[in-house]
Amino acid sequence: MINEKFLDVISHEGVVALVTWGSNGVHVSNTWNSYLVIKDNRILIPAAGMNKTQDNIEQNGRIKATVGSRDVMGYRSMGTGFLVEGSVRFLDSGEEFDMMFEKFPFLNRVLEITPDLVKQTL
């Protein structure tokens, strides 16, 4: 599901939009491509904040995210992006948490996305 083009995109810096929704509506938070770690077809993201994101995830364990880079060739020209949809949860301990804390010591949780869809959009 996560292909080489997606990995190429996250190897270049860009903004990631994380969209969650709950009883208080839709919430969008952002992070950076360089913070995404792929492990076993899951996307791990360091979190230090993201309180509304967590509230929404506790109500609805789904997420949509966009990831892109202008430095990667798309379908017709430079620049490409992806839509990711899947289930999501926060980790606050365990092997993945420890591994991510080594890379990103500012985190207090790890956002784990298990994608159902990873679709190139540009």
Image: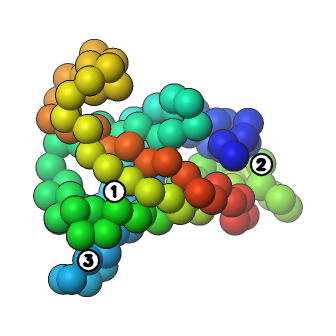
Q: Position of residue 64 (x, y in %)?
A: 47, 65
Residue at 22%, 62% (x, y): give it. Answer: 58
Residue at 69%, 46% (x, y): give it. Answer: 1
Given residues 104 and 64, the one toward you in this image is: 64
Q: Residue under circle 2? A: 73
Residue 24 seen in this snapshot: yes
Front disc: 2 or 3: 3
Viewed as shown, does residue 84 lie left or right of 45?
right
Viewed as shown, does residue 16 lie left or right of 20?
right
Amino acid found under the numbered disc labelled 1: Asn
Q: Residue under circle 3? A: 22
Label 1 with label 2: CB-CB less than 8 Å: no
Label 3 element class: strand
Residue at 25%, 83% (x, y): give it. Answer: 25
Viewed as shown, does residue 118 lie left or right of 50?
right
Q: Crowding near pointer 3: few (<14 within 10 Å), some, many (20+)?
A: some
Viewed as shown, does residue 64 lie left or right of 108?
right
Residue at 59%, 57% (x, y): give it. Answer: 116
The quarter of the picture where the C terminus appears is bottom right
Establish if 66 lies above or below 101: below
Establish if 22 lies above or below 2: below
Q: CA separation, marks 2 and 3?
A: 35 Å
Amino acid found under the numbered disc labelled 2: Met
Q: Residue under circle 1? A: 30
